[in-house]
Amino acid sequence: MAQPSDHLPRGAWWDLFADPELRALEEEVATANQDLKIAEARLREARAAVRFNRAGLFPTISTTLGPRSVRESSNQPFLAPGSRPGSSGDLLWSLDMSYEVDLWGRVRRTVASARNEAQATAADLETARLSLQAELAIDYFELRAADAQQQLLDETVKAFEAALRLTMNRFQGGAAPKSDVAQAQTQLDTTRVQATDIAVQRAQFEHAIAVLIGKPPASFSLPRRPLDHRPPDIPIGVPSQLLERRPDIAAAERRVAEANEQIGIARAAYYPTVMLNASVGFEGSSFGNFLNASSLLWSVGASITRRSSTAGAGAPPPRRRAPPTTRRSRGVPADHPDRVQQVEDNLTALRVLEQEGQQQRQAVESAQDSLQLFTNRYRGGVDNLPPGDHGADRGAREPAERDRHPAAAGSAPACSW
C-alpha cells in the first residue's frame, strides 16, 4: 500500500552537480521569487482558517459593561390621557457564555476539512518551490550548453577564417579555383550566423533565470562558462517511490479527504443545532447598589434550532449532481496517469541520454581521428581542400557538446530527489 512521503526533507538536491553558481541561484529562488511568496501567503491563510474553525470546539465567552438610560415616547400608542411617559436607567455588567454541542460532528468535520486544506496548500507550496527550482536548473544548464556551443562556434569561425585566407592565397597563386574561395566564404558566413543564433538563445535563458530569482533581466548577467564536468549519478529510485514523494500527488489526495469531510458537514445541516447558554452579572440603578447581592442576575438554558425554511439552502442537493468526493476524485485518476507518465518519461530519458552521451563521445573521437587523417593528407598534398572544409569534426562535436548534460535536453524532472 502506498504511503505519502512528501513530508520527507528533500534537501539541496542541486548540490549533486557541485556547481557554486547554481547553488547561489537556487538559494535566491527561495527568497526572491514572487510566485513562491504568493504560495506562502496562501499557506498562512489556510493555517489561520484552521485556528479559526478550531475555536468552534470551545465555548464562546463575551462580556458587556455599560450604563443605559431609557425615556418613553409621549406619542406611544395606547398611552392614557393625562399620563406622562416614564424614564429609567441602570448599570449593567454581564458575562455570557454559549456553546454548540457537536452531536452531529459538524464542528469536528469543519476543523478536519480546514486541516486537510492547509496540508494540501502546503503541498502546493512545495510543488511550486520544486517546479521553480527544477526550471532554474534546466535554464542554467541550457545556458551553459549554449556557452559550450558558442565556444565551439567561435573556434570554428577562427578556423574557417584561416581556411578562407589559405584558399584565397591558393587561388591567387593559381593552385585553387574560384569555386573553392566561394565555398570557404559560404562556410564562414554560415558559421557566423549560427554563432549569432546561439548568442540570442543564451540571452533568453539568462533572462529566464533573472525572472525566476526576481531580478530585472536588464540588470542581470552570468559570466560565460562552458560545461566542464560530467553530470553526477542521480539516485532516482523506483517510479512508485518517486510518486509517493511528489507533493502534487499528496495535495490531490488531501483535497479528496477535504471533500469527504464536506459531505459530513452537509449532512449535519439536516439535523438541529443544540446550544447551551449561560449568563451571570449585576444590574443596578446607581453605582451605590450596582454590586449588591440583590443586584445579581443569572440565567442558564439550552436551545434546539432547526431551520425549517431557507429557500432551498438547507434542502438536499439534486440527485443528478455528483457529491464532492465524486467530483474531486474524478480529477485524481485523470491526472494520475499523466504524472505516472511524467515519472516514466524522465526515468527513460535519463537512461537513454546516458547511452546517447556515450555514443556522442565515440562520434567525437571518430571525428577527431578523421580530422587528423584529412590534415595529414592535406599537408602531404593528396587533398586540395583544407581540413576544416570537411566539417566532420564540427558536425560531431556540436551535438556532443549539447548533450553532455541531461538537463540541457530534457524537461523538468518529475521526481524530487
Image (spheres, rainbow, N blue to C red):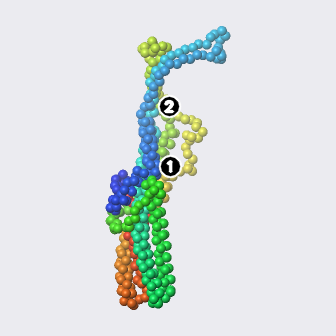
Work out whether 167 lies above or below 150: below
Q: Residue at x 52, y 39 (%)?
A: 270
Viewer-side residue, 247 vs 20: 20
Q: Position of residue 73 (x, y in %)?
A: 62, 16
Viewer-side residue, 381 vs 304: 381
Work out whether 238 lies above or below 65: below
Relative horizontal placement of residue 277, taking residue 417 as reference (left or right): right
- Quadrant hosting residue 406: bottom left
Q: Amino acid at mark 1?
A: Pro
Residue farthest to the right, as pictured: 81
Work out whether 26 lies above or below 227: above
Nearer to us: label 1 or label 2: 1
Residue neighbourhood size for the residue with mark 2, other residues' Cα within 10 Å, grouped as few (<14), some (14–19), many (≥20): few
Residue 414 in view of the camera: no
Viewer-side residue, 297 vs 68: 68
Relative horizontal placement of residue 185, taking residue 223 as reference (left or right): right
**How many numbered dots are placed on residues in this image?**
2
Query: Which quarter of the figure is the C terminus placed in?
Result: bottom left
Q: Determine which of the numbered discs, if any, sits on residue 324 in the image.
A: 1
Q: Position of residue 281 (x, y in %)?
A: 44, 20
Residue farthest to the top, as pictured: 82
Residue 196 in view of the camera: yes
Q: Determine which of the numbered discs, if any, sits on residue 304 in the image.
A: 2
Secondary structure type for disc 2 = strand
Q: Residue at x 67, y 10 (%)?
A: 81
